[in-house]
Amino acid sequence: VFIFLIFGCKSTGTISGDVALVEIPAIIPAPTEANWGSGQFIIPENNTICYNSGAKISAEWLQHLLQAAKINSEVTSGDTCGNWNIILDSSLQDLGEEGYALSITNTGVSLKSATETGLFYGIQTLRQFMPAGVENASAEKVPALRNVEIKDSPKYSWRGSMVDMARSFFGIDYLKRHVDRMALYKLNRLHLHLTDDQGWRIEIKSKPKLTEIGGKSAVKDGNSGFITQEEYIELQDYALARNIVIIPEVDMPGHVYAALVSYPELNCAENSNINPKKATPPDLYSGYEVGWSRFCLEDEKTYDFVSEIVGELAKITKGPWIHLGGDEIEDPRYEEFVVKADSIVRHYGKTSIGWEEVTKAEVDGSLISQNWNGKTKSIVDVKIIESICSNFYLDHANFPGQENTLNWCKPDGVSIKNVYDFKTNNPNVIGVEAPVWTEHVTNDAMMDDRFWPRLAAVAEIGWSQDSNRNFEDFITRLKKHENRLRNMGIRFHPSPEIDWV
Ligand code: TNX
Protein backbone atom coordinates (compact mmCIF):
# COMPACT_ATOMS: atom_id res chain seq x y z
CA VAL A 1 0.00 0.00 0.00
CA PHE A 2 2.82 2.32 0.92
CA ILE A 3 4.59 1.78 -2.40
CA PHE A 4 1.35 2.21 -4.24
CA LEU A 5 0.72 5.54 -2.55
CA ILE A 6 4.09 6.91 -3.55
CA PHE A 7 3.71 5.60 -7.04
CA GLY A 8 0.16 6.94 -7.24
CA CYS A 9 1.25 10.29 -6.03
CA LYS A 10 4.07 10.54 -8.51
CA SER A 11 2.04 9.45 -11.46
CA THR A 12 -0.96 11.65 -10.92
CA GLY A 13 0.28 14.39 -8.65
CA THR A 14 -3.26 15.00 -7.55
CA ILE A 15 -3.45 13.58 -4.05
CA SER A 16 -3.54 16.99 -2.46
CA GLY A 17 -1.89 16.27 0.88
CA ASP A 18 1.12 14.77 -0.87
CA VAL A 19 1.99 17.59 -3.22
CA ALA A 20 5.23 19.11 -2.00
CA LEU A 21 4.72 22.68 -0.97
CA VAL A 22 6.96 25.30 -2.39
CA GLU A 23 9.55 26.47 0.12
CA ILE A 24 9.11 29.61 2.17
CA PRO A 25 11.11 32.22 0.26
CA ALA A 26 14.11 34.03 1.72
CA ILE A 27 13.04 37.67 1.99
CA ILE A 28 15.61 40.43 2.51
CA PRO A 29 15.02 42.74 4.27
CA ALA A 30 12.94 40.71 6.72
CA PRO A 31 9.33 41.91 6.69
CA THR A 32 7.69 43.26 9.81
CA GLU A 33 5.08 40.54 9.95
CA ALA A 34 4.70 37.41 7.83
CA ASN A 35 2.20 34.67 8.59
CA TRP A 36 2.92 31.73 6.33
CA GLY A 37 0.09 29.48 5.25
CA SER A 38 0.21 25.89 4.13
CA GLY A 39 -1.21 26.37 0.65
CA GLN A 40 0.18 27.86 -2.52
CA PHE A 41 -0.86 29.82 -5.55
CA ILE A 42 0.09 28.14 -8.81
CA ILE A 43 0.38 30.85 -11.39
CA PRO A 44 -1.85 30.08 -14.38
CA GLU A 45 -0.81 30.49 -18.01
CA ASN A 46 -2.96 33.46 -18.80
CA ASN A 47 -3.13 36.27 -16.33
CA THR A 48 -4.83 39.51 -15.85
CA ILE A 49 -3.39 42.07 -13.49
CA CYS A 50 -6.07 44.34 -12.21
CA TYR A 51 -5.36 47.70 -10.66
CA ASN A 52 -7.60 50.30 -9.14
CA SER A 53 -7.28 54.00 -9.81
CA GLY A 54 -3.77 55.36 -9.72
CA ALA A 55 -1.88 52.10 -9.43
CA LYS A 56 -1.14 51.63 -13.14
CA ILE A 57 2.62 52.03 -12.83
CA SER A 58 2.76 49.35 -10.14
CA ALA A 59 0.61 47.03 -12.23
CA GLU A 60 3.10 47.44 -15.04
CA TRP A 61 6.03 46.70 -12.74
CA LEU A 62 4.29 43.46 -11.80
CA GLN A 63 3.60 42.66 -15.44
CA HIS A 64 7.29 43.20 -16.11
CA LEU A 65 8.24 40.87 -13.27
CA LEU A 66 5.90 38.13 -14.49
CA GLN A 67 7.24 38.59 -17.99
CA ALA A 68 10.72 37.85 -16.65
CA ALA A 69 9.24 34.59 -15.35
CA LYS A 70 7.89 33.90 -18.87
CA ILE A 71 4.31 34.61 -17.88
CA ASN A 72 2.35 36.95 -20.11
CA SER A 73 -0.27 39.03 -18.45
CA GLU A 74 -2.70 41.69 -19.41
CA VAL A 75 -3.05 44.83 -17.35
CA THR A 76 -6.52 46.24 -16.84
CA SER A 77 -8.13 48.65 -14.47
CA GLY A 78 -11.24 47.69 -12.52
CA ASP A 79 -12.43 46.61 -9.14
CA THR A 80 -13.10 42.96 -9.62
CA CYS A 81 -10.88 40.67 -11.58
CA GLY A 82 -8.92 37.46 -11.49
CA ASN A 83 -5.78 36.42 -9.70
CA TRP A 84 -3.73 39.58 -9.41
CA ASN A 85 -5.03 42.64 -7.65
CA ILE A 86 -3.01 45.79 -7.20
CA ILE A 87 -4.85 48.20 -4.99
CA LEU A 88 -4.02 51.71 -3.87
CA ASP A 89 -5.80 51.87 -0.58
CA SER A 90 -5.51 55.10 1.34
CA SER A 91 -7.18 53.49 4.34
CA LEU A 92 -3.94 51.59 5.05
CA GLN A 93 -2.79 54.46 7.25
CA ASP A 94 -0.87 52.39 9.77
CA LEU A 95 1.61 51.12 7.18
CA GLY A 96 2.84 54.61 6.35
CA GLU A 97 4.32 56.09 3.18
CA GLU A 98 6.33 53.02 2.21
CA GLY A 99 4.45 50.11 3.76
CA TYR A 100 2.33 47.50 2.02
CA ALA A 101 0.13 44.50 2.72
CA LEU A 102 0.60 41.41 0.60
CA SER A 103 -1.78 38.50 0.65
CA ILE A 104 -1.24 35.28 -1.26
CA THR A 105 -4.01 32.69 -1.12
CA ASN A 106 -4.62 29.54 -3.14
CA THR A 107 -6.46 31.57 -5.74
CA GLY A 108 -4.43 34.72 -6.15
CA VAL A 109 -2.42 37.66 -4.95
CA SER A 110 -3.59 40.92 -3.52
CA LEU A 111 -1.20 43.77 -2.90
CA LYS A 112 -2.30 46.94 -1.12
CA SER A 113 -0.63 50.15 -0.11
CA ALA A 114 -1.53 53.76 0.50
CA THR A 115 1.14 54.80 -2.02
CA GLU A 116 2.75 53.73 -5.29
CA THR A 117 5.99 53.48 -3.34
CA GLY A 118 4.50 50.89 -1.02
CA LEU A 119 3.16 48.92 -3.99
CA PHE A 120 6.62 49.01 -5.54
CA TYR A 121 8.09 47.53 -2.36
CA GLY A 122 5.39 44.87 -2.27
CA ILE A 123 6.44 43.91 -5.79
CA GLN A 124 10.09 43.73 -4.70
CA THR A 125 8.96 41.27 -2.02
CA LEU A 126 7.05 39.25 -4.63
CA ARG A 127 10.16 39.30 -6.78
CA GLN A 128 11.88 37.30 -4.04
CA PHE A 129 9.13 34.65 -4.22
CA MET A 130 10.08 34.07 -7.85
CA PRO A 131 13.02 31.92 -8.95
CA ALA A 132 16.40 33.61 -9.32
CA GLY A 133 16.03 33.29 -13.10
CA VAL A 134 13.69 36.30 -13.17
CA GLU A 135 16.78 38.44 -12.67
CA ASN A 136 18.18 37.61 -16.09
CA ALA A 137 15.15 36.22 -17.91
CA SER A 138 16.46 32.68 -17.59
CA ALA A 139 13.57 31.50 -15.44
CA GLU A 140 11.54 28.47 -16.32
CA LYS A 141 7.91 28.93 -15.55
CA VAL A 142 7.17 30.18 -12.01
CA PRO A 143 6.16 27.13 -10.04
CA ALA A 144 4.11 28.41 -7.16
CA LEU A 145 3.90 31.10 -4.53
CA ARG A 146 3.58 30.06 -0.92
CA ASN A 147 0.50 31.36 0.88
CA VAL A 148 1.20 34.25 3.19
CA GLU A 149 -0.16 37.38 4.81
CA ILE A 150 2.53 40.04 5.01
CA LYS A 151 2.30 43.45 6.63
CA ASP A 152 5.49 45.38 6.13
CA SER A 153 6.88 48.88 6.59
CA PRO A 154 10.37 50.27 7.18
CA LYS A 155 12.07 51.11 10.44
CA TYR A 156 13.93 54.07 8.92
CA SER A 157 13.07 56.50 6.12
CA TRP A 158 16.73 56.78 5.04
CA ARG A 159 18.28 53.62 3.60
CA GLY A 160 21.18 54.53 1.43
CA SER A 161 24.46 53.95 -0.26
CA MET A 162 27.13 56.39 -1.37
CA VAL A 163 29.36 56.18 -4.42
CA ASP A 164 32.54 58.27 -4.41
CA MET A 165 32.71 59.28 -8.07
CA ALA A 166 35.42 61.84 -7.40
CA ARG A 167 38.50 59.78 -6.60
CA SER A 168 37.69 57.44 -9.46
CA PHE A 169 34.89 58.15 -11.90
CA PHE A 170 31.84 55.91 -12.22
CA GLY A 171 29.38 56.77 -14.97
CA ILE A 172 25.63 56.43 -15.26
CA ASP A 173 25.69 52.91 -16.73
CA TYR A 174 27.17 51.54 -13.53
CA LEU A 175 24.99 53.79 -11.39
CA LYS A 176 21.79 52.62 -13.11
CA ARG A 177 22.74 49.00 -12.48
CA HIS A 178 23.48 49.95 -8.89
CA VAL A 179 20.02 51.52 -8.61
CA ASP A 180 18.39 48.30 -9.90
CA ARG A 181 20.21 46.30 -7.28
CA MET A 182 19.38 48.73 -4.49
CA ALA A 183 15.69 48.62 -5.43
CA LEU A 184 15.50 44.84 -4.91
CA TYR A 185 16.49 45.41 -1.28
CA LYS A 186 14.20 48.43 -0.75
CA LEU A 187 17.06 50.92 -0.44
CA ASN A 188 15.88 54.44 -1.25
CA ARG A 189 18.76 56.96 -1.19
CA LEU A 190 21.76 57.19 -3.51
CA HIS A 191 24.32 59.75 -2.40
CA LEU A 192 26.83 60.79 -5.08
CA HIS A 193 30.13 62.18 -3.80
CA LEU A 194 30.66 64.30 -6.90
CA THR A 195 33.72 66.37 -6.09
CA ASP A 196 36.98 66.04 -4.24
CA ASP A 197 40.67 66.89 -4.55
CA GLN A 198 41.14 64.33 -7.32
CA GLY A 199 38.27 65.30 -9.60
CA TRP A 200 35.10 67.29 -10.31
CA ARG A 201 32.40 65.05 -11.81
CA ILE A 202 29.29 67.13 -12.48
CA GLU A 203 28.85 69.66 -15.25
CA ILE A 204 28.21 73.20 -13.97
CA LYS A 205 27.18 75.27 -16.97
CA SER A 206 28.27 78.62 -15.54
CA LYS A 207 31.67 77.20 -14.52
CA PRO A 208 32.69 75.01 -17.46
CA LYS A 209 36.33 74.69 -16.40
CA LEU A 210 35.30 72.61 -13.39
CA THR A 211 34.79 69.67 -15.71
CA GLU A 212 37.05 70.77 -18.58
CA ILE A 213 40.01 70.89 -16.20
CA GLY A 214 38.86 69.36 -12.91
CA GLY A 215 37.15 66.46 -14.66
CA LYS A 216 40.39 65.33 -16.26
CA SER A 217 42.09 64.03 -13.15
CA ALA A 218 41.59 61.05 -10.87
CA VAL A 219 43.35 59.17 -8.16
CA LYS A 220 46.40 57.18 -9.30
CA ASP A 221 45.15 54.18 -11.34
CA GLY A 222 41.62 55.63 -11.24
CA ASN A 223 39.37 56.90 -14.03
CA SER A 224 38.69 60.51 -14.87
CA GLY A 225 35.50 61.86 -16.43
CA PHE A 226 32.28 63.63 -15.50
CA ILE A 227 28.54 63.45 -16.05
CA THR A 228 26.61 66.12 -17.89
CA GLN A 229 23.53 67.66 -16.32
CA GLU A 230 21.45 65.75 -18.86
CA GLU A 231 22.97 62.47 -17.69
CA TYR A 232 22.40 63.46 -14.08
CA ILE A 233 18.72 64.08 -14.84
CA GLU A 234 18.45 60.81 -16.75
CA LEU A 235 19.95 58.89 -13.82
CA GLN A 236 17.75 60.75 -11.37
CA ASP A 237 14.56 59.90 -13.29
CA TYR A 238 15.65 56.28 -13.57
CA ALA A 239 16.26 56.17 -9.82
CA LEU A 240 13.04 57.99 -8.90
CA ALA A 241 11.03 55.50 -10.94
CA ARG A 242 12.48 52.94 -8.53
CA ASN A 243 11.79 55.12 -5.50
CA ILE A 244 15.41 56.08 -5.02
CA VAL A 245 16.27 59.72 -4.42
CA ILE A 246 19.64 61.02 -5.62
CA ILE A 247 21.55 63.24 -3.19
CA PRO A 248 24.31 65.27 -4.85
CA GLU A 249 27.35 66.14 -2.73
CA VAL A 250 29.72 68.95 -3.51
CA ASP A 251 32.36 68.66 -0.81
CA MET A 252 33.34 72.07 0.66
CA PRO A 253 35.25 73.98 1.96
CA GLY A 254 37.96 71.29 2.07
CA HIS A 255 38.48 68.50 -0.47
CA VAL A 256 38.32 71.13 -3.23
CA TYR A 257 41.63 70.89 -5.04
CA ALA A 258 40.04 69.99 -8.40
CA ALA A 259 37.97 73.19 -8.18
CA LEU A 260 41.02 75.25 -7.18
CA VAL A 261 42.96 74.05 -10.20
CA SER A 262 40.04 74.88 -12.46
CA TYR A 263 39.48 78.35 -10.97
CA PRO A 264 42.75 79.41 -9.27
CA GLU A 265 41.16 82.65 -8.09
CA LEU A 266 39.47 80.52 -5.40
CA ASN A 267 42.87 80.01 -3.75
CA CYS A 268 43.95 82.42 -1.09
CA ALA A 269 46.76 84.47 -2.58
CA GLU A 270 49.10 83.88 0.32
CA ASN A 271 48.00 81.26 2.74
CA SER A 272 50.61 79.49 4.73
CA ASN A 273 48.08 76.82 5.71
CA ILE A 274 47.97 75.58 2.19
CA ASN A 275 50.70 73.31 0.97
CA PRO A 276 51.93 75.52 -1.87
CA LYS A 277 53.23 72.65 -3.96
CA LYS A 278 49.92 70.84 -4.08
CA ALA A 279 47.70 73.89 -4.38
CA THR A 280 49.45 75.49 -7.31
CA PRO A 281 47.54 75.08 -10.55
CA PRO A 282 47.59 73.60 -13.08
CA ASP A 283 48.98 70.41 -11.52
CA LEU A 284 46.17 67.96 -11.01
CA TYR A 285 46.19 65.80 -7.90
CA SER A 286 46.19 62.01 -7.92
CA GLY A 287 47.37 61.22 -4.41
CA TYR A 288 45.59 59.82 -1.37
CA GLU A 289 45.99 62.50 1.26
CA VAL A 290 42.98 64.24 2.77
CA GLY A 291 42.47 67.52 4.60
CA TRP A 292 45.00 69.76 2.87
CA SER A 293 43.08 71.83 0.30
CA ARG A 294 40.55 74.58 0.96
CA PHE A 295 38.60 77.43 -0.49
CA CYS A 296 39.72 80.86 0.58
CA LEU A 297 37.21 81.65 3.29
CA GLU A 298 38.25 85.28 3.66
CA ASP A 299 37.12 86.08 0.17
CA GLU A 300 33.51 86.87 -0.81
CA LYS A 301 34.23 85.36 -4.24
CA THR A 302 34.09 81.96 -2.56
CA TYR A 303 30.47 82.53 -1.57
CA ASP A 304 29.50 83.70 -5.07
CA PHE A 305 31.03 80.47 -6.34
CA VAL A 306 29.18 78.35 -3.78
CA SER A 307 25.95 80.09 -4.65
CA GLU A 308 26.32 79.44 -8.38
CA ILE A 309 27.15 75.79 -7.86
CA VAL A 310 24.36 75.17 -5.36
CA GLY A 311 21.90 77.14 -7.53
CA GLU A 312 22.57 74.98 -10.58
CA LEU A 313 22.50 71.76 -8.58
CA ALA A 314 19.25 72.74 -6.88
CA LYS A 315 17.67 73.37 -10.26
CA ILE A 316 18.37 69.87 -11.57
CA THR A 317 17.80 68.03 -8.31
CA LYS A 318 14.29 66.75 -7.62
CA GLY A 319 14.98 65.50 -4.10
CA PRO A 320 14.91 67.92 -1.18
CA TRP A 321 18.59 67.53 -0.19
CA ILE A 322 21.97 68.91 -1.15
CA HIS A 323 25.04 67.56 0.60
CA LEU A 324 27.70 70.14 1.38
CA GLY A 325 30.44 67.83 2.55
CA GLY A 326 32.20 69.81 5.26
CA ASP A 327 34.54 67.02 6.37
CA GLU A 328 38.17 66.91 7.39
CA ILE A 329 39.23 70.51 7.49
CA GLU A 330 40.55 72.88 10.13
CA ASP A 331 40.05 76.54 9.37
CA PRO A 332 39.36 79.49 11.68
CA ARG A 333 36.44 80.44 9.46
CA TYR A 334 35.03 76.94 9.10
CA GLU A 335 31.94 77.47 11.28
CA GLU A 336 31.11 80.72 9.54
CA PHE A 337 31.40 78.98 6.17
CA VAL A 338 29.07 76.16 7.17
CA VAL A 339 26.40 78.56 8.42
CA LYS A 340 26.59 80.61 5.22
CA ALA A 341 26.66 77.62 2.89
CA ASP A 342 23.67 76.09 4.67
CA SER A 343 21.73 79.33 4.25
CA ILE A 344 22.59 79.33 0.53
CA VAL A 345 21.17 75.81 0.24
CA ARG A 346 18.00 76.90 2.02
CA HIS A 347 17.80 79.96 -0.23
CA TYR A 348 17.50 77.59 -3.18
CA GLY A 349 14.74 75.66 -1.46
CA LYS A 350 16.73 72.64 -0.36
CA THR A 351 17.81 71.10 2.95
CA SER A 352 21.52 70.71 3.68
CA ILE A 353 23.31 67.58 4.71
CA GLY A 354 26.87 67.68 5.98
CA TRP A 355 29.40 65.26 7.41
CA GLU A 356 29.24 65.37 11.20
CA GLU A 357 31.86 68.14 11.55
CA VAL A 358 29.25 70.65 10.36
CA THR A 359 27.46 70.37 13.71
CA LYS A 360 30.36 72.28 15.31
CA ALA A 361 28.69 75.29 13.70
CA GLU A 362 25.45 76.83 14.84
CA VAL A 363 23.52 75.73 11.79
CA ASP A 364 19.80 75.80 11.20
CA GLY A 365 18.07 72.85 12.90
CA SER A 366 16.83 71.57 9.55
CA LEU A 367 20.33 70.48 8.55
CA ILE A 368 20.99 66.74 8.63
CA SER A 369 24.27 65.46 9.98
CA GLN A 370 25.95 62.37 8.56
CA ASN A 371 27.92 60.57 11.28
CA TRP A 372 31.13 58.88 10.24
CA ASN A 373 33.01 58.57 13.50
CA GLY A 374 30.47 59.92 15.96
CA LYS A 375 33.10 61.88 17.87
CA THR A 376 32.19 65.43 16.88
CA LYS A 377 30.85 67.42 19.77
CA SER A 378 27.67 68.75 18.24
CA ILE A 379 26.32 72.11 19.36
CA VAL A 380 23.05 71.67 17.51
CA ASP A 381 20.32 69.09 17.88
CA VAL A 382 19.75 67.75 14.37
CA LYS A 383 18.61 64.65 12.56
CA ILE A 384 21.32 62.09 11.89
CA ILE A 385 22.20 59.64 9.13
CA GLU A 386 24.40 56.87 10.53
CA SER A 387 27.45 56.00 8.46
CA ILE A 388 29.72 55.11 11.37
CA CYS A 389 32.89 53.88 9.70
CA SER A 390 33.28 50.71 11.78
CA ASN A 391 29.91 49.45 10.53
CA PHE A 392 29.31 51.19 7.22
CA TYR A 393 32.57 52.06 5.42
CA LEU A 394 32.50 49.51 2.65
CA ASP A 395 35.80 50.70 1.18
CA HIS A 396 37.17 48.83 4.18
CA ALA A 397 38.19 45.19 3.78
CA ASN A 398 35.71 42.33 3.52
CA PHE A 399 38.24 40.22 5.43
CA PRO A 400 41.52 41.05 7.23
CA GLY A 401 44.21 42.01 4.76
CA GLN A 402 42.11 42.28 1.61
CA GLU A 403 44.06 44.02 -1.15
CA ASN A 404 43.11 47.53 -2.27
CA THR A 405 41.14 48.39 0.82
CA LEU A 406 41.58 50.94 3.56
CA ASN A 407 41.74 50.03 7.23
CA TRP A 408 42.17 53.27 9.18
CA CYS A 409 38.82 52.85 10.90
CA LYS A 410 38.87 49.11 11.47
CA PRO A 411 42.15 47.25 11.00
CA ASP A 412 40.50 43.86 10.42
CA GLY A 413 37.94 45.20 8.00
CA VAL A 414 34.17 45.43 8.12
CA SER A 415 32.61 41.97 7.95
CA ILE A 416 28.95 41.28 7.15
CA LYS A 417 28.49 40.72 10.87
CA ASN A 418 30.10 44.08 11.70
CA VAL A 419 27.58 45.74 9.41
CA TYR A 420 24.69 43.71 10.74
CA ASP A 421 25.52 44.33 14.40
CA PHE A 422 24.82 48.06 14.14
CA LYS A 423 22.17 49.25 16.57
CA THR A 424 21.23 52.60 18.00
CA ASN A 425 18.64 54.00 20.34
CA ASN A 426 19.25 57.58 19.33
CA PRO A 427 15.83 59.01 18.43
CA ASN A 428 17.45 61.57 16.09
CA VAL A 429 18.63 58.87 13.72
CA ILE A 430 16.61 58.86 10.51
CA GLY A 431 18.49 56.01 8.91
CA VAL A 432 21.67 54.44 7.63
CA GLU A 433 23.95 54.83 4.65
CA ALA A 434 26.99 52.90 3.44
CA PRO A 435 29.71 54.72 1.47
CA VAL A 436 32.27 53.28 -0.87
CA TRP A 437 35.21 55.67 -1.14
CA THR A 438 37.24 55.04 -4.24
CA GLU A 439 40.89 55.76 -3.52
CA HIS A 440 41.45 52.07 -4.33
CA VAL A 441 38.22 51.11 -6.07
CA THR A 442 38.78 51.76 -9.72
CA ASN A 443 36.50 49.49 -11.73
CA ASP A 444 32.99 48.01 -11.69
CA ALA A 445 34.07 44.61 -10.37
CA MET A 446 35.83 46.20 -7.41
CA MET A 447 32.81 48.39 -6.68
CA ASP A 448 30.56 45.29 -6.74
CA ASP A 449 32.97 43.48 -4.43
CA ARG A 450 32.82 46.29 -1.88
CA PHE A 451 29.07 46.83 -1.93
CA TRP A 452 27.86 43.24 -2.13
CA PRO A 453 26.73 41.35 -0.24
CA ARG A 454 27.33 43.82 2.62
CA LEU A 455 24.81 46.31 1.24
CA ALA A 456 22.08 43.69 1.72
CA ALA A 457 22.91 43.78 5.44
CA VAL A 458 22.67 47.57 5.39
CA ALA A 459 19.24 47.21 3.77
CA GLU A 460 18.02 44.91 6.52
CA ILE A 461 19.31 47.25 9.25
CA GLY A 462 17.54 50.13 7.56
CA TRP A 463 14.23 48.39 6.92
CA SER A 464 13.62 45.63 9.44
CA GLN A 465 12.58 46.02 13.05
CA ASP A 466 15.34 45.18 15.53
CA SER A 467 13.11 42.43 16.94
CA ASN A 468 13.09 40.72 13.51
CA ARG A 469 16.84 40.79 13.13
CA ASN A 470 18.92 37.70 13.69
CA PHE A 471 22.36 37.28 12.17
CA GLU A 472 22.26 33.49 11.68
CA ASP A 473 18.89 33.73 10.02
CA PHE A 474 20.08 36.62 7.84
CA ILE A 475 23.09 34.64 6.66
CA THR A 476 20.84 31.68 5.81
CA ARG A 477 18.57 33.91 3.74
CA LEU A 478 21.49 35.72 2.11
CA LYS A 479 22.96 32.40 1.01
CA LYS A 480 19.67 31.71 -0.79
CA HIS A 481 20.15 34.97 -2.69
CA GLU A 482 23.39 33.75 -4.22
CA ASN A 483 21.96 32.92 -7.64
CA ARG A 484 19.84 36.05 -7.64
CA LEU A 485 22.94 38.19 -7.04
CA ARG A 486 24.81 36.27 -9.71
CA ASN A 487 21.98 36.56 -12.23
CA MET A 488 21.90 40.30 -11.66
CA GLY A 489 25.51 40.35 -12.79
CA ILE A 490 26.86 41.36 -9.39
CA ARG A 491 30.46 40.31 -8.81
CA PHE A 492 29.86 40.10 -5.07
CA HIS A 493 32.56 39.30 -2.58
CA PRO A 494 32.56 35.61 -1.57
CA SER A 495 32.38 36.63 2.09
CA PRO A 496 33.87 33.99 4.38
CA GLU A 497 30.76 34.04 6.57
CA ILE A 498 28.81 32.24 3.86
CA ASP A 499 29.28 28.81 2.40
CA TRP A 500 28.87 29.93 -1.21
CA VAL A 501 28.51 27.31 -3.92
C1 TNX B 1 37.33 59.57 5.07
S1 TNX B 1 35.08 60.24 6.66
C2 TNX B 1 36.76 60.45 4.18
C3 TNX B 1 37.08 60.33 2.77
C4 TNX B 1 38.03 59.21 2.49
C5 TNX B 1 37.69 58.03 3.36
C6 TNX B 1 38.50 56.81 3.10
C7 TNX B 1 34.90 61.27 5.48
C8 TNX B 1 33.72 62.08 5.51
N1 TNX B 1 35.82 61.37 4.52
O1 TNX B 1 37.57 61.55 2.29
O2 TNX B 1 37.91 58.86 1.14
O3 TNX B 1 37.88 58.40 4.69
O4 TNX B 1 38.13 55.74 3.92
Image (tube, rainbow, N blue to C red):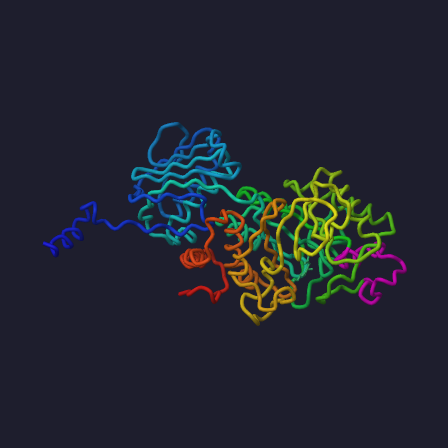
Along the viewing direction, whichever of 47 and 370 lies nearer the viewer: 370
Q: Is residue 263 left or right of residue 9?
A: right
Query: From where the camera sits, is residue 251 visible?
Result: no
Along the viewing direction, whichever of 443 and 243 lies nearer the viewer: 243
Q: Give how far across and how far down residue 63 sits, in percent.
A: 41, 41
Which residues, given as a range, are shown in magenta? 254-281
Q: Is residue 222 left or right of residue 331?
A: left
Q: Quadrant of ligand 1?
A: bottom right
Asked where in the image residue 76 lies, by quadrant, the reply is: top left
Q: Is residue 451 left or right of residue 248?
A: left
Q: Give how far across and how far down residue 14 sits, in percent.
A: 19, 46
Name the residue at 53% across, 56% down: 455
Name the residue at 50% across, 64% down: 493
Asked where in the image residue 62 lies, by quadrant, the reply is: top left
Q: Is residue 416 left or right of residue 150?
A: right
- Residue that lies at the very extreme toward the front in this rendered image: 425
